[in-house]
Amino acid sequence: MPDISRKTLLKAALVAAPLPFVAGQFPARATVTPTPSCDDGDDLTPDQTEGPYFKPNSPERTVLTGPGTPLTVSGFVFGMHCLPLANVLMDFWQADTYGNYDNVGYTFRGHQYTNAQGAFNLTTIVPGLYPGRTRHIHVKVQAPHQPILTTQLYFPGEPRNNTDTIFNPALLMNVRTVGSGKEGTFDFILNVQGTPPTTPTPPPGGTWQAGKSYQTGDQVTYGGATYRCLQSHTAQPGWEPPNVPALWQRL
């Protein structure tokens, strides 16, 4: 079985746990540079124009309500070295089902923060179309005390993707139909160092070792328990058997 990527493993192991929100302000938009230290075949999320319809001070909420086709957008925010980023400020705004932006109030506008595992979840609708643009959702993404990334998320299979001069395929969400609605996923990668996980000290007698290559079927002991390797990989700090059920099965 082929080795798995660090980001894919982290996504498999992360479990959502909400954190309290703290309001923040946006600094000037920064342009990010490609090729992060964490390279799972991904580059840093590209920035895009803010457009004419952004409004500051949106309400804190994860649900944007109104008529239209239901849509949820979820994913993770990672920094360099594939580390999930907590408390990242994410400000979303979009057109309604008819292609109109609310420039008086805050309909289909709201901000939220990633949880301890770097996860976010937005409940909204599929935005409508308006002249000159394909279907899209705007978002500002800012890790604590870091520059802001302003970008847009796009929908696959849209005819206008081919004619929209702003469209970037690197910003396509994975979208599927679920019942009468849609589910989209997208992971952001920011030019942020992040904080590496601490290295736990293996208990006396444990055979698991960071830096060692394990093959499917190998057995180790850790914390007084025995584990069987499920996928070939090279062990790293933070990937101890109890922490990564995608790699180790307790016997």
Image (cartoon, grey):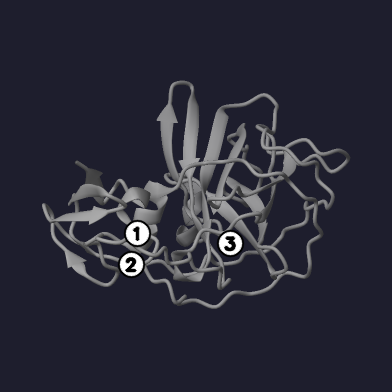
Q: Is residue 173 left or right of residue 54?
A: left
Give the x, y percent position of residue 189. Answer: 51, 63
Residue 157: x percent and y percent?
A: 42, 44
Amino acid type shown at disc 1: Trp
- Image mark for residue 102: none
Say which residue label 2 marks: 236
Q: Are marks 1 and 2 in contact (CB under 8 Å)?
A: yes
From the viewer's perspective, tell me whether residue 109 is left or right of residue 129.
Answer: right
Q: Badge 3, how many Cα within 10 Å: few under 14, some, many 20+?
A: few
> SS for tag 3?
loop
Q: Amino acid at mark 2?
A: Gln
Above or below for 49 versus 19: below
Residue type, numbered disc 3? Ile
C-beta proximity under 8 Å, tags 1 and 3: no
Viewer-nearest residue: 227 or 149: 227
Furthest-left residue in this view: 217
x, y percent for residue 95: 69, 41
Residue ID for mark 1: 239
